[in-house]
Image (spheres, rainbow, N blue to C red):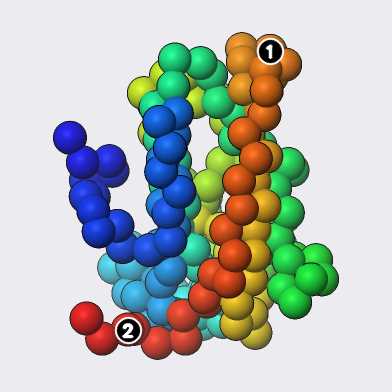
Amino acid sequence: MPAFGMSKPYPGPFIERPDLLIILRQHAPEQIAAFYEARGFPRTAIERIKATCFVTVHIKNRSDDVIWLDLAEWTFTRKDKPLERLDRSYWDNQWDSIKLRQASRSTFGWTQLPDVRDLQPDEPVGGNLVFPGNTDRFDMKLKLPTGIDRQGEPIMLEFRDIECLKEVKAE
């Protein structure tokens, strides 16, 4: 059965192992804008969203153990320097400044990758990571603790040279 309704070739960079599958999907600003416009977001919110870089992460636990997603254990770099992830507190400040209604805030929150989440065997999770819009390419190192108590051998992975799309790529 295809993971996340996707089958090979996957639509972006991926790591596939017997114990897990991670797929990244890069989105151009116009694609992300269309998604949120269709959900009634006001123009002021759309403009702030379009000024960023969205990467959707899909993770599927294929193991018989618990795998932990903990974004505090992930590092993002651009040209070997730390890259800021625009997290929930950043977006809360953005939404406060334009007085975004609660329904839109909730919708936006549901589309973000959870900060911390346990993935039970055969369980998937997905959501967006957001970076500043002036990001062109970046690397990410992932540490995924394992085991019910997070004491198992961590899974260490790396994606290099991930592109932040500026426009929709031609198929």
Q: Residue at x 25, y 59 (%)?
A: 9
Q: Residue at x 53, y 47 (%)?
A: 113
Report which residue position mark 2 lands on: 169
Residue at the outermost left position? 1
Judge the density around disc 1: few (<14), some (14-19), many (≥20) Cα neighbours within 10 Å: few
Q: Position of residue 170 (x, y in %)?
A: 26, 86
Q: Position of residue 146 (x, y in %)?
A: 62, 22
The vertical placement of 67 against 73, above or below, is: above
Question: Does residue 132 appear left or right of residue 11 in this picture?
Answer: right
Q: Place residue 52 in its image quadrant.
A: bottom right
Label 2 and label 1: CA atoms lie apart by 42 Å
Say which amino acid is labelled 1: Asp
Q: Mark 2 vs mark 1: which is more N-terminal?
A: 1
Q: Position of residue 18 (x, y in %)?
A: 40, 31
Q: Nearer the viewer, residue 125 or 90?
A: 125
**Disc 2 + disc 1, Cβ < 8 Å:** no
The vertical placement of 122 against 88, above or below, is: above
| Residue at disc 1, secondary structure | loop
Report which residue position mark 1 lands on: 149
